[in-house]
Image (cartoon, rainbow, N blue to C red):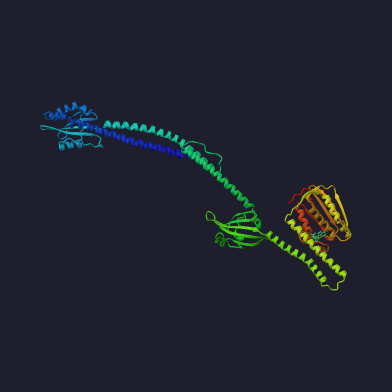
Amino acid sequence: MKRGLHTKLMLIMLLLNLSLMTVVGAFLIRGVLRFYQNEFYKQMHSVFSEDQAFAGDLRAAAAEADGAKKLDEIMTKKSSSLGINSDTRNYYILDGNGQYLYGSSKPVGTLEATPNILAAIATGKESYKSNSTASYMDVALPVSGENNKFIIYIRDDKQTVQALNTELFFIIMEALIISLVISVLLSFLLSKTLVTPIERLTVAAERVSKGDFTEKIAGETRDEIGILNRTFNNMASKLRNTLNDIEKERNKLITVFLHMTDGVVAFSQDGRVMHSNPSAERMLGRSLGNDWVNFGNVFGEFVSMDDLLTLKYPEYAEFERNIKGRDLEIALAPFSGYDEQGGILAVIHDVTQQKKSEQLRREFVANVSHELRTPITNIRSYAETLSEGGEIPPEMAKSFLKVIVNESDRMAKIVQDLLTLSRLDAEANFNFEKFSFAASVGSTYDSMLLEAKKHNLNLSLNFEGDLPEITGDRARIEQVLLNILSNAVRYTPEGGSVNVRAGHDGENVWMSVQDTGIGIPKEDLPRIFDRFYRVDKARSRASGGTGLGLSIAMDIVRKHNGSINVESTLGKGTTMTVILPIDAKLS
Ligand code: ADP
């Protein structure tokens, strides 16, 4: 680039000089020529036309018999004032026909009959016609006396002026060469002051175009180049700030796009996947990054892309489909790009969990209604029988009333358990404190001793090592221990044994309740923590169970970041182990 601009500058300077010198030279040479010619005729006029005495002398000389000789003598005397030098400027005395008689020098060959000579012969009057293109200047003056007719002819063959012009030409050529050398030097100087900053600016612009904004252009001059440099630096820093802002916004949007829970897929107008986020791939259960994946094979079976492209903002299409086991709500709308390209944007919302929760809620309400209806029906029928006032033996009436009281207790227990569950769901206040886990296990054990004795069960308690104090909601943890221990007692037939052990393992404490009871069928194991789930409804109900005990226990343990393990063999017994962190934090 430097070479290009420098060469151009040099060429311009050279051409400028050349044309300037040519014009000046031409004017100078023409001016010299004109001046010389004007001077010649002025000189002739002053001698022949204005000097009347000289004209009279000429006429007198011409009248004499040897007029030509006399004229020659007069002219010889006047030679200096006419500038005659016998070389480039001569005078000639011609006869009336223009033939040479005398002169300052003899002409080589015959004297040329010039227009002025011919005019003097023809008109008998002096002729001063000048022709600037001719190689000579001349004047022809007819002089007559008595019978004699002569012509005084003065001719200058311009050699003096030509020599002068030749000299001038060489001077101009010399000046031209010197000025050309100066031009070359000046062009270097100009290139240094003009091209170098431009070159610096170009390098900086290239750097900026590659995204490198680290260096600024130096050069704090006050001229236009300095202003350009400052403007460029300002522009680059503004560009960098704008790009940084855009980059930040872009990163923010990408982060939101990648981590948003809703799935988003953008399709181009020809159906190609332009963008998709991991949620969309997870929900649709397929990769969207492959070339062959397009609108047709993702949503084509539900809606046509052409129909969607005709929608106008804020219209959009929405439908719900089960795709690969997931219930998905899909909203599709066209979008337009800045270059009118646009496409279709799909937003996918996974409602599987929502549907599941709704289903669970419905089941829960049905279960609650069912659980409450049974005791209410029982209470009502016994109460009705009693109120009919028939012949009911007192013993039977007493047993009826006992059923009514038992059923009321059951209802109260169910309501109490439901209240406990709803409090756990609502994250009701947990009262976290430090307490002795061993003491809680001991008091739970003690509270079940009587019940175990009633059922003729062999209840035992063993601590493995010293147990540390733990952090948690003491009352609720004791409820967990009680639920598990009471289940063991409830589901172990008479004569069986229930063995309670507690210990400490690293960051956790544990309580394990092992019974020799009825056990739990393998297929029911995953569901025993569900609300109202009971393996044997009749047995549970008969023993005062509500089907909510384990679900309450699990909720409480989870809130403490603990777990409950179950191992069971049908007909042989069950072992349930509660594991709790020593330093629990509410989760
Ligand atoms: P319930 O009030 O019916 O005992 P839970 O939620 O406490 O309800 O227990 C759910 C079900 O798990 C019980 O109905 C019972 O079928 C089974 N189960 C729980 N613990 C034991 C156990 N130790 N032995 C056998 N079955 C058990």
Residue at point 36% right, 37% down?
19
Please give the name of the residue rendered at 11% of the width and 30% of the height, measured from the top-left corner: 63
Q: Please state if 331 lies on the left or on the right of 448 as rendered.
A: left
Which residue occupies the foreground of this view, 464 or 70? 464
Q: Quadrant of residue 525?
A: bottom right
Q: In the image, residue 25 lies at what x, y percent?
A: 33, 35
Q: Residue at 81%, 51% (x, y): give it.
A: 510
Compared with residue 560, is residue 300 higher up or lower down, i.e. above or below? below
Answer with the quadrant where ligand 1 appears in the image: bottom right
Spot the residue most to the left. 146
Residue 185 location (% of width, % of height) = 43, 33
Relative image position of residue 507 (x, y in whole percent): 78, 47
Between 322 and 416, the one nearer to me in the picture = 416
| Residue 82 sits above or below residue 575 on the image | above
Whether 481 is drawn above or below 108: the answer is below
Q: In this view, does 129 lie to the left or right of 414?
A: left
Of 397 and 449, the residue lying toward us: 397
| Direction from residue 215 to residue 137 in the image, left or right | left
In the rendered image, the residue lying farthest to the bottom is: 390
- Whether residue 572 is visible here, answered yes or no, is no
Q: Number of callouts in the render?
A: 0
| Residue 268 falls left or right of residue 175 | right
**Residue shown at the point (31%, 36%) measured from the top left:** 27
Answer with the quarter of the image where residue 116 lies.
top left
Q: Quadrant of residue 213?
A: top right
